[in-house]
Image (tube, coloured by chain):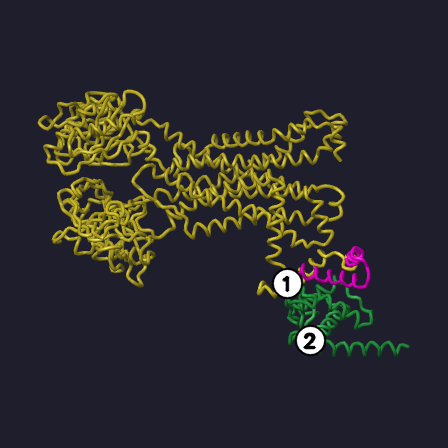
Chain colours: A green, B yellow
C-alpha cells in the first residue's frame, strides 16, 4: 500500500520508480521525461500521458518531487520536476526493493526451467 | 495549495506544452503540420480526461467549488422559472426570518452599551400574578441602602417637559435619575462631566443637567460652549454640565432622552415621601462575586420588612392584597426593558411562524429540485455510468442549493432591514419610543446559520434521492416511482405545516377582528384625542380658567360637533383606581375599589355614551356648587342592585359626592377587560388641576377628524399664551396603540398565513404539473382505450385528496399541540375552537384546488394522438 492508500499494482509502482530515476538526473519537464524513458528503455517502454501526469502529480503530492515553472530550451514556459531529499531516499529504497524483487522473480523463473 | 505563481499547478498549460512539443517533434521528423497535429491528438488522447485524472490525484477543493457554482448558475439561468420561484420563496422566508430575528435581537438579546452589563440586576415589586411593577422612592432607598449583594443602585423614570432655553420654549424628553445612575452603568462623558450623587441632592448648590449626544448635535451643533448653558424647567434653572456618550441612550430600552436630570430635584414632596407612590424602576450593580440569587433572596426578605408596617396603616380590606405582593431581583443586562414584557411572547410566536415559513420554502425547494432531478435522471445516470463519484454529485446538488440559498439569504438580509423597521413602526405606532434594529453580528450569524440549515434541509434529500438511482433502468426509461412517493411526502408535510400556519393566522386575525368588534360603550369614530402642555406652571385659579376657556374655544370651532375632556382617556392603558364607600341602604356598604375619572361637561354627549338616568355634568357644576358624581351601570348594580341610585352619596378620600347620573358601561383601561365599576367626578369641581393634566376629546361633525388638527392647535394657543398642543390623534389610532402585540400578530400572522398558502400551493402545483407531464402518454393510452375526461380529472384529483387529507390531519394534530401556547394572546377565541380549524381547512382546500386547477385541466385535455407520439 502506498501512503495515500491508493492501490499500487506492479506497473504503477514501476512507473513511479522509473520517473524518480529520470528526474534524479536533473530538473526536467513532462515531455522530456516521456522521451527520456522511451530512449533509455530502447523504445520498449511507452508511457501514456494519461498515466504519466497523474503519476507526476501524485509524486509531487507525496513530496518526492517538487515542481516549478521555468523557461524550457525553446524559451517557452514548462513545468520542471526535480527530486526532493525524500524522493532521493525513496528512489534508493525502491531500487533496492526492485533489485530484490527482480532477483527473486528471475530466480523463480530460472528454477522452473 | 495556491502558493507562489511559479509553483501553481496549471495542469492544462502543462499538458498543452506536452502536446505542442509532440507536434514539434513530428514536424521536425518531416510530417506536415496538420498531420502532426492529428497524430499528436491521437497519441495524447483526451486532454480533459487527463486533466481530471490529475485533479483527482491532487485533490480538489476550491477549483471544484467554483466549477460547481458556475455549473449551478448555468443550470439556474437555463431554468429561470424554477430559479425565480425558488429564490422568491427563499427571499420571503429568509427576509422574514432575519427581520423578526433583528427585532428579537433588539428587544430581547442586545445588552446595554455599558460597562459589564451582565452584572446589572433589576429589583422590583412583583404583583400577585407575577408581573413586575414600579417601586416608590422610599422603597428604592430601602433596597439601595440595605441589599448587601449590590454595590450601588439607581432609580429611573422618564418624563417630558417644557423647557425655556435662549428665550424660546422647547419640548424635550427627559430621563430622571438618581445620583448613582452613571456610576452604576460605568459610563464616561462625551464632554464635560456626568451627574453624580452630589447633584442628586436637595441641597445641591447648582441644579445640574446632562444632555444626550443627539440633543447636543441638534440644539448646539456639538459646540463645547453648550457646557455651562442654562435652561429653566418649572421655574427652576438648570445648568448643562456634560454630554452622555453617543453609543448610549438610556437605561430604559426605547427611551431616547434629550436631557437627563437629577431625580430628587424633580419630584414633589409627596413622591419623595409616599411609600405607595410607585413610579420608579430600580437597577443595581452586583458586588463582585455576588449572584442574582443572593440579591433576590435579600430583596424578598427586605420587602417583608418594608411592607409589614405599611400594611398596618391601610384599611383592613386592602391589607391582604398589599401583603400578596412580593419583591424580586432579576438579571437586567438589557436594562429596563418595557418591550420585553409586551413583545417577548408575540415575538417568539412570530419567530416560530417564520421558522415554519422557512421550512416550507425549503420543502418547496426540495420538491422543485426533486422534480428536476427526476427530469435529469438520464443526465445523472450517464454521469454515474462514466464514473462520476456519487459524493461529487451530491456535492454538486448541494452547491446548487447553496447558490439559491445564498442569493435568497442576501436578498433576505437586504429586505430584512426594511421589514424589521416596518415591524417596529407597527409596534411603536407613533409613540415616543425608539428601537434600533440595525443588524449586528448576531443578526448576520443568525442569517448565515439559517441559510446553511436551509441549504442542508432543502438540498440533501433530493441529492441523496438523485444519486441513489440505479444506473441501468434509469438510462432506459424516465424516472422511477420511488421519487414520486418522496415528492408526495414532501407535499404532505408542506400541507401539514401550512395548516398549522393557517390555523395560527385564523386565530390571530380572528382575535384582532373580535377586539375591534367589541362594544366599547362609546362611538370612537370621528373623535380626535388632543393632549396639551403648558410652558410654565399655572396657579390654581388660572388653571381652571384656562381649562374652561380651551373647552369653550374647542366647542365653537367650525366642523366641531362636541368637545370635552377627561383625566383618563378610555382604552389608553391608563388607570386611576380609588377606594370608595357608599352611604345608606346598599348591597355593598363597605369600602371598595372602583375605577375613577375626572371629566368635563358634555363628556358623555361627546363620546356618545348613553345616560341611563339623571344628567351629566354641565357648566353649573363648578367650584362653588355641591360636589356631584356620575356612576356607570356596573357601579350601580354592584353597590345598589336594582335600587334607585340618583341622589345617593358616595365618599372617597374623605370627600363626599352626590350621585346625579347613571351612564351605561364603557371600556376603561383596555379592550379586553370586562365592564369595570366606574365613578366620574366633575373636573371643574376639582381644585387646580392644570389643563395639561386633561386630555381633550373633539368630535368632528363629519369626515376625518384629522382635518381639525390645525384649527385645534390655534385654539390651544389662543386659549392661553403658555399653552401648546402636544399630540393630536384619532381615537382609532389610540385604540390601535392599545393592542400593539395583537395587531402585529394579527397582521403579520395573517400575512404569513397567506405566504404559507402560496408556498404550499406552488409546491402542490409543481408536483401535479410534473406528474401530469410525465404521465401524458399513460393518459393518452387511457383515453384511447375509452376513459372519459372525467375519469382523468378524478385520477389527478384523487392524488390531491390523498395528499390533502393526511396533510391536513397531521396539521390539525400539530396545531392542537402548539396553539395552546398562544392562549394568552387570543381574545374571544379558544385555541381549540373547532370553527377556526374548519375555516383553516377550507382556506387550505381552496388553495389546493387553485393549485390543482391547471394540471387537472391539462390532464383532461390530453390528446391521445399527440400523447402517444410523445414517447
In the depicted structure, whether residue B841 falls above or below residue B273 = above
Mark 2 closeness class: few <14, some 14–19, many ≥20 residues within 10 Å: some
- Looking at the image, residue B120 sits to the left or right of residue B619; the answer is right
Cα distance between the residues tagged 2 and 1: 23 Å
Q: Mark 2 points at which residue?
A: A90
- Residue A96 sits in which quadrant? bottom right
In the depicted structure, whether residue B12 falls above or below residue A44 = above
- Residue A83 sits in which quadrant? bottom right
> Is residue B507 or residue B534 the one in the foreground?
B534
Magenta stretch holds residue B21:
yes
Query: Does residue A30 appear in this view?
Result: yes
Q: Could you confirm whether marks 2 and 1 are on the same chain? A: no
Rendered image: mark on residue B9: 1
Q: Residue furthest right?
A: A113
Classified by dominant secondary structure, the portion drawn in magenta counts as: helix
Looking at the rendering, the stretch of residues picked out in magenta corresponds to B11-40
Q: Do the residues labelled 2 and 1 touch (CB within 8 Å)?
A: no
Expressed as whole percent of the image width and height from the top left, the position of residue B288 reads 30, 63
Expressed as whole percent of the image width and height from the top left, the position of residue B76 reads 61, 43
Amino acid at each position: 500500500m502506498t501512503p495515500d492508500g491508493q492501490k499500487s499494482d506492479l506497473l504503477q509502482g514501476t512507473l513511479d520508480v522509473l520517473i524518480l530515476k529520470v528526474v534524479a538526473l536533473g530538473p526536467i519537464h513532462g515531455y522530456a521525461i516521456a522521451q527520456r524513458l522511451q530512449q533509455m528503455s530502447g523504445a520498449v517502454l511507452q508511457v501514456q500521458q494519461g498515466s504519466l501526469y497523474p503519476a507526476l502529480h501524485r509524486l509531487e503530492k507525496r513530496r518526492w518531487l517538487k515542481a516549478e515553472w521555468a523557461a524550457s530550451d525553446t524559451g517557452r514556459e514548462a513545468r520542471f520536476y526535480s527530486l526532493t531529499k525524500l524522493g532521493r531516499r525513496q528512489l534508493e529504497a525502491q531500487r533496492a526493493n526492485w533489485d530484490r524483487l527482480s532477483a527473486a522473480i528471475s530466480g523463480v523463473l530460472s528454477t522452473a526451467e | 495549495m495556491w502558493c507562489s505563481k511559479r509553483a501553481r499547478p496549471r495542469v492544462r498549460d502543462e499538458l498543452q506544452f506536452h502536446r505542442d512539443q509532440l507536434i514539434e517533434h513530428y514536424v521536425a521528423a518531416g510530417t506536415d503540420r496538420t498531420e502532426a497535429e492529428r497524430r499528436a491528438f491521437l497519441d495524447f488522447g483526451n486532454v480533459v480526461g487527463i486533466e481530471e485524472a490529475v485533479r483527482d490525484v491532487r485533490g480538489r477543493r476550491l477549483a471544484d467549488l467554483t466549477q460547481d457554482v458556475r455549473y449551478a448558475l448555468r443550470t439556474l439561468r437555463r431554468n429561470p422559472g424554477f430559479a425565480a420561484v425558488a429564490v422568491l420563496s427563499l427571499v420571503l422566508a429568509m427576509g422574514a426570518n432575519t427581520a423578526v430575528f433583528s427585532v428579537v435581537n433588539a428587544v430581547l438579546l442586545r445588552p446595554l452599551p455599558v460597562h459589564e452589563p451582565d452584572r446589572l440586576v433589576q429589583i422590583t415589586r412583583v404583583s400577585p400574578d407575577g408581573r413586575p411593577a414600579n417601586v416608590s422612592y422610599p422603597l428604592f432607598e430601602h433596597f439601595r441602602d440595605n441589599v448587601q449583594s449590590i454595590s450601588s443602585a439607581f432609580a429611573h423614570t422618564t418624563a417630558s417637559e417644557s423647557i425655556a432655553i435662549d428665550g424660546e420654549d422647547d419640548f424635550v424628553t427627559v430621563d430622571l435619575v438618581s445620583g448613582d445612575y452613571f456610576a452604576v452603568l460605568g459610563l464616561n462623558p462625551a464632554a464635560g462631566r456626568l451627574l453624580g450623587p452630589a447633584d442628586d441632592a436637595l441641597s445641591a448648590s447648582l441644579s445640574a443637567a446632562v444632555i444626550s449626544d443627539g440633543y447636543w448635535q441638534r440644539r448646539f451643533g456639538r459646540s463645547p460652549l453648550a457646557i455651562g448653558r442654562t435652561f429653566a424647567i418649572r421655574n427652576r434653572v438648570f445648568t448643562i454640565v456634560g454630554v452622555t456618550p453617543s453609543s448610549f441612550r438610556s437605561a430604559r430600552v426605547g427611551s431616547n432622552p434629550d436631557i437627563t436630570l437629577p431625580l430628587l430635584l424633580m419630584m414633589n414632596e409627596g413622591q419623595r415621601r409616599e411609600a405607595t407612590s410607585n413610579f420608579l424602576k430600580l437597577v443595581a450593580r452586583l458586588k463582585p462575586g455576588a449572584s442574582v440569587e443572593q440579591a433576590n433572596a435579600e430583596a424578598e426578605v427586605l420587602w417583608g420588612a418594608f411592607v409589614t408596617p405599611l400594611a398596618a396603616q391601610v384599611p383592613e380590606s386592602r391589607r391582604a392584597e398589599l401583603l400578596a405582593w412580593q419583591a424580586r431581583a432579576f438579571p437586567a443586562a438589557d436594562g429596563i426593558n418595557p418591550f420585553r414584557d409586551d413583545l417577548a411572547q408575540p415575538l417568539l410566536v412570530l419567530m416560530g411562524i417564520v421558522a415554519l415559513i422557512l421550512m416550507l420554502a425549503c420543502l418547496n425547494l426540495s420538491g422543485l429540485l426533486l422534480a428536476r432531478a427526476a427530469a435529469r435522471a438520464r443526465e445523472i445516470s450517464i454521469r454515474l455510468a462514466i464514473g462520476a463519484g456519487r459524493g461529487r454529485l451530491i456535492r454538486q446538488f448541494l452547491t446548487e442549493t447553496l447558490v439559491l440559498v445564498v442569493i435568497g439569504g442576501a436578498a433576505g438580509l437586504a429586505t430584512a432591514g426594511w421589514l424589521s423597521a416596518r415591524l417596529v413602526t407597527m409596534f411603536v405606532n407613533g409613540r415616543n419610543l425608539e428601537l434600533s434594529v440595525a443588524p449586528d453580528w448576531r443578526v448576520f450569524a443568525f442569517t448565515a446559520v439559517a441559510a446553511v440549515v436551509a441549504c442542508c434541509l432543502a438540498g440533501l434529500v433530493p441529492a441523496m434521492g438523485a444519486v441513489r438511482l440505479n444506473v441501468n433502468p434509469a438510462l432506459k426509461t424516465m424516472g422511477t416511482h420511488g421519487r414520486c412517493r418522496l415528492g408526495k411526502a414532501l407535499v404532505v408535510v408542506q400541507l401539514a405545516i401550512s395548516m398549522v400556519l393557517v390555523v395560527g393566522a385564523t386565530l390571530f386575525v380572528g382575535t384582532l377582528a373580535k377586539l375591534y368588534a367589541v362594544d366599547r360603550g362609546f362611538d370612537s369614530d370621528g373623535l380626535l384625542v388632543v393632549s396639551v402642555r403648558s410652558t410654565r406652571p399655572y396657579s390654581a385659579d388660572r388653571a381652571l380658567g384656562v381649562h374652561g376657556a380651551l373647552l369653550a374655544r374647542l366647542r365653537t370651532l367650525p366642523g366641531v360637533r362636541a368637545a370635552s375632556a377627561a383625566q383618563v382617556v378610555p382604552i389608553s392603558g391608563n388607570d386611576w383606581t380609588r377606594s370608595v364607600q357608599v352611604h345608606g341602604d346598599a348591597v355593598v356598604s363597605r369600602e371598595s375599589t372602583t375605577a375613577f375619572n375626572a371629566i368635563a361637561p358634555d363628556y358623555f354627549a361627546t363620546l356618545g355614551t348613553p345616560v341611563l338616568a339623571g344628567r351629566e355634568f354641565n357648566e353649573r357644576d363648578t367650584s362653588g356648587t355641591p360636589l356631584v358624581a356620575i356612576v356607570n351601570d356596573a357601579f350601580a348594580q354592584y353597590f345598589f342592585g336594582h335600587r334607585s341610585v340618583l341622589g345617593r352619596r358616595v365618599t372617597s378620600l374623605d370627600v363626599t359626592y352626590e350621585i346625579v347620573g347613571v351612564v351605561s358601561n364603557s371600556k376603561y383601561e383596555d379592550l379586553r377587560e370586562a365592564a369595570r365599576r366606574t365613578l366620574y367626578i366633575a373636573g371643574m369641581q376639582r381644585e387646580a388641576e392644570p389643563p395639561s393634566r386633561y386630555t381633550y376629546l373633539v368630535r368632528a361633525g363629519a369626515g376625518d377628524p384629522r382635518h381639525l388638527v390645525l384649527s385645534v392647535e390655534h385654539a390651544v394657543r389662543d386659549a392661553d399664551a403658555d399653552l401648546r398642543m402636544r399630540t393630536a390623534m384619532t381615537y382609532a389610532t389610540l385604540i390601535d396603540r392599545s393592542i400593539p402585540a395583537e395587531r402585529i400578530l394579527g397582521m403579520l400572522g395573517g400575512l404569513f398565513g397567506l405566504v404559507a398558502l402560496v408556498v404550499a400551493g406552488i409546491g402542490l402545483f409543481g408536483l401535479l404539473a410534473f406528474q401530469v407531464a410525465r404521465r401524458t402518454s399513460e393518459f393518452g393510452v387511457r383515453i384511447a382505450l375509452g376513459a372519459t375526461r372525467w375519469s382523468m380529472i378524478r385520477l389527478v384529483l384523487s392524488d390531491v385528496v390523498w395528499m390533502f387529507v393526511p396533510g391536513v390531519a397531521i396539521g390539525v394534530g400539530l396545531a392542537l399541540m402548539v396553539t395552546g401556547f398562544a392562549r394568552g394572546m387570543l381574545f374571544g377565541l379558544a385555541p381549540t375552537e373547532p370553527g377556526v380549524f374548519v375555516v383553516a381547512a377550507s382556506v387550505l382546500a381552496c388553495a389546493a384546488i387553485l393549485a390543482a386547477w391547471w394540471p387537472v385541466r391539462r390532464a383532461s385535455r390530453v390528446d391521445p394522438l399527440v400523447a402517444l407520439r410523445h414517447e
